[in-house]
Image (cartoon, helix red, strand yellow):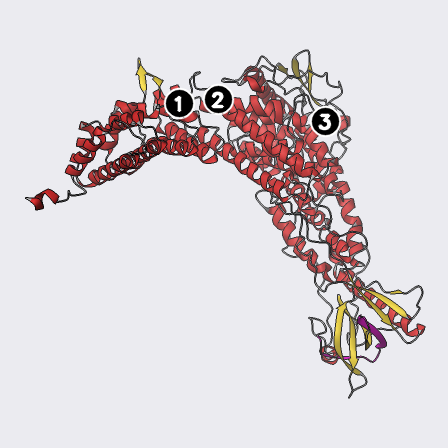
Amino acid sequence: MWFSFWRSRDRFSLQELRYLTDQLQKVQIVNNVNKDHVIEVLRSIAELLIYGDQHDPTFFEFFIEKQIIGEFLRILDVSRTVSVALQLLQTMSIMIQNLKSEHAIYYIFNSEHINDLIGYSFDFGNEELLSYYITFLRAISGKLNKRTISLLVETQNDEVVSFPLYIEAIQFAFHEENMVRIAVRALTLNVYHVGDECVNRFVTSTLLADYFSNLVAYFRKQCISLDGCVSEAAENPDSSDLACFILSAVDEIEDTLYYCSDVISSGVPNIERLVTENILQLLVFPSLLPSLKLEPVDGMQIGASTSMYLLCCILRIVKTKDLARSIGASLFCTPESVLPKLESRPNGYVSGHDLTHENHQPHPDALGMQAGGGSLRVSVLNFSSSDIHPAGCPLLQHDYSSPHLALRDILLSYVVSGDEIHVLGSLNLLATLLQTKELDESILDALGILPQRKHHKKLLLKALVGDVSGEERLFSEENSLTKDEISTELERYLQQLKGQYGWSCSNSEPGISPRIHRYQVLDALVSLLCRSDISAETLWVGGWLLRQLLPCCEEGFNNNPLKPLKDSYICADGLLGEIRGSWCDLLISVLADEWSKCKKAIEASTPQKDPNRMLFPLGVPSVEGESTFAAGEGMCEIVFVLRHQIRIFCSGGALPDQPPVCPPSELPGHTRTKSGIDDGGPKPGSEINIVNAVACRIAFERGKEHHFCFSAISRGTTGWLVLAEESPLKKTRGFVRVSAPLAGSNPKIDDKHSRWLHLRIRPSTMPLMDPTKPNILGKGRTKCLIDGRWTLAFKDEISCKSAQSMVLEGMRLQSSEVERRLKPLLDLSGPTPDPVRIDPAVAIVK
């Protein structure tokens, strides 16, 4: 009998579940004395139900029979400690997540207590409790389908009037804790993806439509916060903390946009319209588009560069036709015109986002939109035949200084004369518009950025189906859509803006010429490529865009808008200066490297430049003055390669993988053997010819002079300054002790000591071959680098001058060989000189 009394219960048995339930029912109050016991009971019940779900269905039948969820709610009511609430929420979450039987889930959701638990008044001031609660709600949403979702809603006349799970969750949609926001977004998407028609009508009803306007309002706050970080970073470009804040803000902004995209793609009727209208009316029209103007506009809180970045993100991520078309058509307006009227409100508009603005009367000569008397009018200049170049090109003398430019013209003005950040922002925005598939070709053509391949594809299709006009334009110089087609299409989109957003639009002056607009864009891009104050990587984005728009023919390159590019290519002053510069020995390698990068950039399917770069300030140069490092930085920014590749493309040729340069000069084999110098240069300890070397003294440390034979050796595009010790056995031979590059040595005789020769010593390899530009974290460039110096003392003034002449002659021969090899690339007039053959083993002395 005693053995029977002490026999333990089977842990995973229905008897154990009965015992735990009985223990729970006996609890009348939960305090610090019995809270641990209650927590253990709740945990054990969840464990047994999960076991029973997989092994014995009677466990769950007992759970339903005793209405244990109701006991859970009673425990909550009598509990005076938060730890029990935490365990109860965790118990429910674990049960719902791990129950495999749809029958069990059905019975849990069918219980009237589940909605009571969802709507229970928890103390969410406790962050841990909120986290467990949100996890509980998300666990429920993970089990939703068309059968189970109906158990969680309240209906009247077949319409949903209450959905506690959704309503309670969206109250935390904009919580400061990121994990809470993520969980709520996942829950809402789970609800949308169920596809229940009644639920879909409920979540998009007027009662709950505020969620979408609040979502965009929250997104707008994120945008303003990002712009604040960008503005502060511009004032403190060396702050890595601010750069981290910017990257974090960018991640949050993109997460919100991807969520909006997922919401739109969920297939809920009317939800795309709600999201699109709120994005346009709460963010794009009142803030982003007007902020493209550098001058402050009333109520604007976002900078131009940030606005361009955000527009790129919106077009790239939120792919809806109405959104893309509205933004594209709005670019023909002035910044003041796109500000929405105060009486215009999107569904669910938040009053805290009203913007007051006093209408400005635009200049009557402005190209683009004109606003006056509360109406918006498209005003496009008519171009007569006299406005067209005889060769078929417009004379582009567009004035970007007008105070009332259309948004499209503001973007082009940045390309022509803006700083690097605004240039990059404008190029990225134009490139994003060009790649936006949701944007009609008619708008792209009106903006002047419809790629040539799309022109030909459209006209070819017309010709194939027997359209005579399409066939004629396919083989004509003017193969764009007609002015009437563009004006009609643009007018239709502007009328949509009028109907949806209260704008009064009319196009009483038809005659938009897409060809003229395209040449305006080409003109701006060519002007950009001729600028010297923009980095090569940013210009590559311009080159990519130009390549999309240019015809593949020599005639296109000879047209008036492209003539400055051809002239700047022919001049090539910068490249000629590098041939005689401090790094001429590495110039061909640098050009080959830049050629490969540039070719990859302009032939890519999308621009290679990271769009986030437009948010970060440019770093200050790491070196200044006459340092060889400053010269190296400048050489790595050569834009000649881009201009040359554009010219090859325009002439209809294919870009080679390597730049067209002449092969190196051939040196006799016995010369190499005699010199003791291989292609890698003189090595310490190697034996060389010192017949023409000049004796000198040098001290690398204070009080320690060394006697050496000094030589300047030039072979092909390479050259070295060599200090050698005379061989004790052979007077005409010596052993290399120290060597340095010949290029950039800049020999100068000391003003006060005529026997002293100063030489500038740069590294043998370029530290900036892959320039350390201001990285994305804003930590600036590498620390300032300085050149080395040699001061050689000779026995007399004649020897010093001979050494200087030897160095100068070697540098001249070195530059001449570099110029000879680059002749095909430079395409200069005159015959190519014969290779200069020199004996590298013999120092050149005048």
Q: Which residue is mark 2?
A: 274
Residue in the foreground of this view, choosing between 365 and 106: 106
Q: Nearer the viewer, mark 2 or mark 3?
A: 3
Q: At 43% from the left edge and 16% from the top edge, which residue is drawn?
A: 207
Evaluate whether residue 124 shows in this view.
yes
Q: Amino acid at mark 3?
A: Glu
Q: Earlier in the sequence, mark 3 or mark 1?
A: 1
Compare marks 1 and 2 and give the one earlier in the sequence: 1
Q: Residue furthest left?
A: 1
The residue lying at 48 percent from left, 33 percent from top is 177
Tell me, yes or no, if residue 322 can be seen here: no
Picture quadrant where residue 134 is located: top left
Q: Which residue type does callout 1 highlight? A: Ile
- Which of these two is toward me, 214 or 711? 214
Q: Which residue is painted at 57% across and 14% down in the image?
A: 344
Instruction: State which region is magenta.
Output: 684-702
Specify the quadrant of the image occupied by residue 544.
Answer: top right
Q: CA distance from mark 2 to mark 3?
A: 32 Å
Q: Is 335 within the magenta?
A: no
Q: Quadrant of the C terminus?
A: bottom right
What is the C-alpha distance between the residues marked 1 and 2? 18 Å
